[in-house]
Image (tube, rainbow, N blue to C red):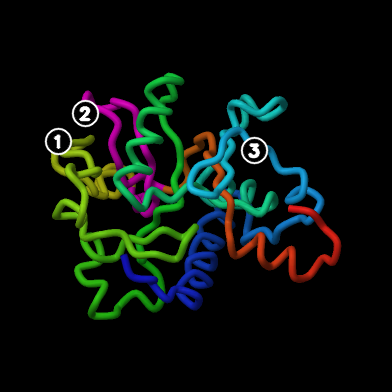
């Protein structure tokens, strides 16, 4: 997939989430990495050159849940980000992880571009072409087709409205836009699939090494071991 060139748009995403969380009392900005946490970050397993850890499996964090931005900020302090499921192999790996560990759901770094700057022609219609991985700055394939080189469609074929995801169902129910992407475990008897979800819902976090944050901390903190 192409790099999404979202430096400005990601800042807008943080601003948009800031406005939402201001009303809800949540965090207001993206957290910067904390060098000491980065160097001692938990590493439960390694895949494709990245270390990962799941909050529920880390002592002291077993019951920790948060909304989408809280999850990102938790991971970012450790030079990580919410997991990005960019390939079929990666998605299958975490689908099996969720099934094996009987996890109900996790946040991913997926988000829809529904804020200032998202009126670009290549993102329209935004519910189909406007999804991206904030953790890697890469675009997600159009939601109405199977991604290139995938053998299955990761988005669920059903949900609260009994129609294919993403369906923005909660906006119809209580006015909350479903701007964030979660991996849900058979919540709608649909297997383990992608769903668009309103970002305020509390969920546990799967954190993945962020190359950008690790490079930044390494460049600005002489002698630190990552």
The residue shown at (17%, 36%) is 158
- Could you tell me residue 116's position as x and y percent? 41, 76
Comes first in the chain, label 2 or label 1: 1
In the image: residue 192, left or right of residue 161? right
The residue shown at (59%, 47%) is 70
Comes first in the chain, label 2 or label 3: 3
Residue 138 position (above or below residue 197): below
Residue 99 lies within the magenta run: no
Q: Secondary structure at mark 1?
A: loop
- Could you tell me residue 214's position as x and y percent? 66, 60
Viewer-nearest of labels 2 and 3? Answer: 3
The Cα atoms of the two marked residues, 2 and 3, are separated by 31 Å
Q: Secondary structure at mark 2?
A: loop
**Residue tagged by mark 2?**
190
Instruction: Point out the stretch of residues depicted in magenta.
Output: 175-198
> Dot 2 surroundings within 10 Å: few (below 14), some, or many (20 or more)?
few
Q: Nearer the viewer, residue 146 or 215?
A: 215
In the image: residue 151, left or right of residue 52? left
In the image: residue 184, left or right of residue 218? left
**Residue tagged by mark 1?**
162
- Could you tell me residue 166's position as x and y percent? 24, 49
Quadrant of the rendered structure where residue 125 is? bottom left
> Dot 1 surroundings within 10 Å: few (below 14), some, or many (20 or more)?
few
Q: Residue furthest front?
A: 49
> Dot 3 surroundings within 10 Å: few (below 14), some, or many (20 or more)?
some
The residue shown at (21%, 39%) is 156
* Residue 43, label in figure: 3
């Amino acid at each position: 997939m192409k790099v999404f060139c979202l430096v400005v748009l990601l800042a807008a995403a943080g601003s948009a989430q800031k406005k939402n969380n201001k009303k809800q009392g949540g965090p207001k900005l993206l957290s910067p990495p904390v060098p000491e946490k980065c160097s001692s970050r938990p590493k439960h397993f390694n895949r494709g050159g990245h270390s990962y850890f799941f909050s529920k499996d880390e002592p002291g964090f077993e019951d920790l849940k948060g909304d989408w931005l809280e999850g990102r900020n938790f991971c970012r302090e450790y030079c990580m980000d919410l997991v990005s499921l960019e390939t079929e192999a990666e998605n299958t790996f975490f689908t099996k992880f969720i099934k094996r560990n009987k996890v109900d759901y996790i946040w991913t770094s997926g988000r829809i571009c529904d804020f200032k700057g998202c009126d670009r022609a290549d993102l329209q219609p935004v519910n189909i072409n406007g999804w991206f991985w904030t953790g890697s700055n890469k675009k997600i394939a159009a939601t109405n087709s199977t991604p290139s080189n995938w053998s299955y469609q990761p988005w669920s074929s059903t949900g609260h409205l009994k129609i294919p995801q993403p369906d923005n169902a909660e906006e119809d129910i209580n006015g909350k836009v479903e701007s964030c992407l979660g991996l849900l475990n058979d919540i709608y008897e649909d297997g383990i699939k992608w769903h668009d979800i309103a970002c305020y819902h509390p969920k546990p976090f799967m954190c993945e090494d962020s190359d950008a944050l690790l490079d930044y901390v390494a460049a600005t903190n002489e002698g630190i071991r990552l």
